[in-house]
Image (spheres, rainbow, N blue to C red):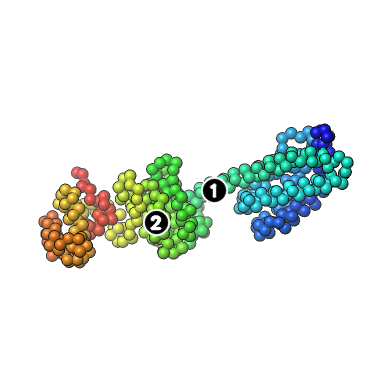
Amino acid sequence: MHATAARRQVAELSRKLAARIDDLAADMARNTYDHIEFYRSTVVGPEDLRASMRLNVAYIIDHLADPESGAVDLSGPTETGRRRALQDAPLTEVLRAYRLGFRHFWDELLLEARKAGGSAPDALLDAASAIWELADTYSTTLTDAYRQTRAERMVETDRRRSALVAELIDGPSPNSETVWEVARILDFPFQGTFLVVTAEGVTPGEPPLPGLESRLRAVDVSSAWRAQPGSETGVLSCPQRGRVDAVLEAVRSVATSRVGVSPVYERLDRTGHALRYAQVAAESLPPGAVAVRQLDDTPLTELVMNNLETTQRAVHRILGGVLSLPEEDRTTLLATARAWLEAHGSATEAGRALYCHPNTVRYRMHRLEEFLRGPLEDPRIVAELSMALDAVGTFPALLELRRS
């Protein structure tokens, strides 16, 4: 059959379907509900689905009914793809509904061709490849619109969550949400088990903690992130304290730079305070290191964080002489002092911890005493030594000699 004649016959069949397009769309919607469970338990209501079916089939009919038509109008699948993406409908189910709709449309065309008789069925068969090619074009357009909309939503969501994290860190700005409202939007509790993680950015454009969010979801930990030049900061909500170790393990497994973790805190409005701990923890690691550090929430830690220069001056007044020794001697004396203090002044217990003879411990402690501001029998000297060792244990940078 001549191609032009065949197109005209298909156009006539399409016009017959146009006369009952409302019934056709309703049948297609019912068919979708009958065969796809998702559409029976979703936000895509019957009227929404029927209107979508009508819109798409109308564009198909208009295209087939005009043999001289040029480019296919893809407004229908574009709108459907965007709408279903905004409704969080699974793409696989949306495409399945599209295939069912096209099959129903084809069956109705075939029925009209058989009713018409004569050469109409042959004309329709001649046009079959073009019609199914149109179906593929519609499905591809729908998929592209769906994915683009999802991508846009992800960007918008990330920007929104980033802004909310900024409010938790910096405090609410005028006319912005309260911390309670921020918690609701992020789907966080206001009171719970929280951590702040901050990671140093090393390579521009590459996340310093690649794949962390999926690992956190695997242990039922929610997170919201704020990316800034040179760093990435996240607020993590754990279902219980028992998940903190799993979080730290997840962070260590993906770290590519210096990463600081705050102590656990229980109120979301303490996020800014917790961030300071995480930042100091990261900064206390050696430059260029790939490591994760979490600070303990102790009075001394907070005191040192708030008065780093004052603490450094105090450390150097207490340990100044020791810090001027060669590195090996300095390290040995400080390690011995820590073991001696942890052993409550017992040279025997300290020796066990250090794998050396008690007399070796006593010798080192006598040598250390020469650099202190008094004898170790004086409780004030012991207290000063304990404070200094705790401070440098938390902030190793305090050991660096101050430059005058």
Label of residue 249 in the image: 2
Q: Amino acid at mark 2?
A: Glu
Q: Is residue 12 visible?
A: no
SS assignment at label 1: helix
Quarter of the image that includes the C terminus: top left
Label of residue 64 in the image: none
Query: In the displayed structure, would residue 230 be above or below residue 195?
Result: above
Residue pictured at 19% horizontal, 58% vertical: 336
Residue pictured at 37% horizontal, 50% vertical: 259
Q: Is residue 359 visible?
A: yes
Give how far across and how far down residue 294 sits, in percent. 35, 56
Query: Looking at the image, which is closer to me, 350 or 224?
Result: 350
Q: Amino acid at mark 1?
A: Met
User: Quick check: marks 1 and 2 in contact, CB under 8 Å?
Assistant: no
Label of residue 154 in the image: 1
Give how far across and how far down residue 261 sits, in percent. 37, 55
Q: Is residue 213 left or right of residue 350?
A: right
Query: In the displayed structure, would residue 375 be above or below residue 254?
Result: below
Sort mark 2 into few (<14), some (14-19) or many (20+) by Cα contacts within 10 Å.
few
- Lower sequence index among marks 1 and 2: 1
Give how far across and how far down residue 230 sits, in percent. 39, 44
Q: Select label 1 or label 2 by which is in front.
A: 2
Residue pictured at 30% horizontal, 50% vertical: 284
